[in-house]
Amino acid sequence: MGSGAQQFRRFDADAPPILNTLTELRQGDGLWSLLRAGDVDWPQPLITRTRDVPLEAGFNLVTWTGPDLTSVDVAVAGFADRLQALFTWDEERQRFNRFSPDAPAAVNTATTLRFGEGVWVQLPGAAVWNQPSP
């Protein structure tokens, strides 16, 4: 997603080059991938320390690098007053789970974060997400 424009950029190896708007990846960019069936080996650096993740207004795709199975309300406590919504992907059900601090608990289907999980965070303005070490 282009952070300033809040638009997805895309790359499809089978598409004509003019249709590909994703031309480079920068350190820290979130990447949402749709892959064909088969094994993919893509080693990623292991983050083992506390880190501050800058978040911008709109949608942010972030990797959760805190402890495995952390409660969402605990994980977002430092910026919950600015959080509109948080989304995680449920691979088994093929749907997004959602958490909003203003929603009733029964509506919040995203309840925990797994280490290494991609998380969509929606905010009205900038914030910093302090993620503890795993």
Image: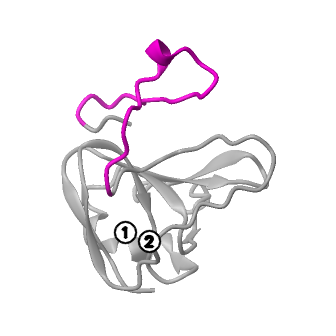
Q: Residue at x 48, y 29 (%)?
A: 10
Q: Which secondary structure, mark 2?
A: helix
Residue 51's x, y, as percent?
Answer: 29, 76
| Mark 1 crowd level (few <14, some 14–19, many ≥20, 10 Å Cα) | some
Q: Is residue 105 above or below residue 124?
A: below
**Coordinates of residue 74 in the picture (x, y in percent):** 42, 77
Please rate how many residues cluster around mark 2, counting C-alpha atoms within 10 Å: few if below 14, some from 14 to 19, many from 20.
Answer: some
| Main secondary structure found in the magenta portion | loop
30 or 11, which lies in front? 11
Examine the rendered structure and indicate whether residue 46 appears above or below residue 2. below
Instruction: Give the amino acid at mark 2.
Output: Asp
Q: Which contiguous range is marked in magenta?
A: 4-27
At a point 77% along the width and 56% down the height, the residue shown is 39
* Foreground of the two, 84 or 7: 7
Its colouring scheme is one colour
Mark 1, residue position: 76
- Tell me if residue 56 comes above or below residue 52 in the rendering: above
Contact, mark 2 vs mark 1 (Cβ under 8 Å): yes
Q: Distance from label 2 to label 1 (Cα)?
A: 5 Å
Q: Nearer the viewer, residue 76 or 20?
A: 20
Q: Determine whether, in the image, residue 72 is placed left or right of residue 88.
A: left
Tell me the SS state at disc 1: loop
Q: Residue furthest left?
A: 126
Residue 84: x %, y % from top left? 36, 49
Judge whether 12 appears above or below 107 on screen. Answer: above
Q: Which residue position holds label 2?
A: 73
Q: Residue at x 66, y 61 (%)?
A: 41
State the image quarter where residue 107 is shown. bottom right
Q: Amino acid at mark 1?
A: Val
Judged left or right of residue 53, residue 86 is right
Q: Position of residue 46 (x, y in %)?
A: 46, 77
> Residue at point 28% right, 38% down?
3
